[in-house]
Amino acid sequence: MFIQTEETPNPATLKFLPGCPVTGGTPVDFTSPEAALRSPLARALFAVNGVSAVFLGSDFITVTNDGARTWATLKPALLGAIMEHFLNGRPVLDPPAAGTPEGTPEEAEDDEIVLQIKELLDQRVRPVVARDGGDITFHGFSKGVVYLHMKGSCSGCPSSTATLKSGIENLLCHYIPEVVEVRAVR
């Protein structure tokens, strides 16, 4: 198994491409070992000293370094953990417990503007952000302001504010006149 790595715009994160599906769909963000209990892969990565966050994309993994170790010392251990996980055929996510909903259903009451915002984010923004090892999720729209959450390598990235304001805000304001501002939420 050959795992490629790519630097991201965020120097604290590294993107790993195992050459196979990771989540195969909806990205999952783990910001602590406790949050990773439902993912054997994320648990294995958090077991490596120096990992502060793990983001699982459709076909990539983004790991955030807590700064205690250099990438030169952290990267081999992470590559080993990822390789061992996939070669042993372990699941990326544990199956949901009986009676647990598998996902959050789309809001049936989204109005036309929210639907337009979500469509632009899904079609134009998320693919670009995913190339850098991150994701962006919609959190709301109120009084002309779109609230978004940056995940993966985009969370804490020095250029995320520029991406949010210069890129995403300009795009949304251009196509949807009701949008006047974009703000990040945590």
Image (cartoon, helix red, strand yellow):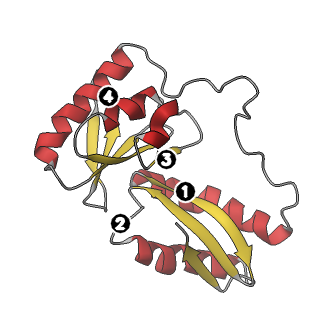
**Residue contact at pointers 1 and 2, CB within 8 angstroms:** no
Q: Which residue is mark 2?
A: 157
Question: Marks 4/2: CA distance?
Answer: 24 Å
Q: Earlier in the sequence, mark 4 or mark 2?
A: 4
Determine whether the residue tagged by mark 2 lies in a helix, strand or loop. Answer: loop
Determine whether the residue tagged by mark 3 lies in a helix, strand or loop. Answer: strand
Say which of 72 and 118 sits in front.
Answer: 72
Q: Any mark on residue 135, and which? A: none
In the rendered structure, the answer to whether residue 19 lies left or right of residue 146 reads left
Q: Earlier in the sequence, mark 4 or mark 3?
A: 3
Q: Any mark on residue 29, and which? A: 3
Q: Is residue 56 visible?
A: no
- Residue 125 in the image, given as x and y percentages of width and height: 55, 62
Which circle, 3 or 1, is nearer the viewer? Answer: 3
Question: Marks 1/2: CA distance?
Answer: 16 Å
In the rendered structure, the answer to whether residue 112 lies left or right of residue 28 reads right
Amino acid beneath label 2:
Cys
Amino acid beneath label 1:
Arg
Determine whether the residue tagged by mark 1 lies in a helix, strand or loop. Answer: helix
- Residue 153 in the image, given as x and y percentages of width and height: 38, 56
Q: Which residue is mark 1?
A: 126
Q: Any mark on residue 82, and which? A: 4
Q: Earlier in the sequence, mark 4 or mark 1?
A: 4
Amino acid beneath label 4:
Ile
- Residue 27 in the image, given as x and y percentages of width and height: 54, 44
Residue 8 occupies quadrant? bottom left
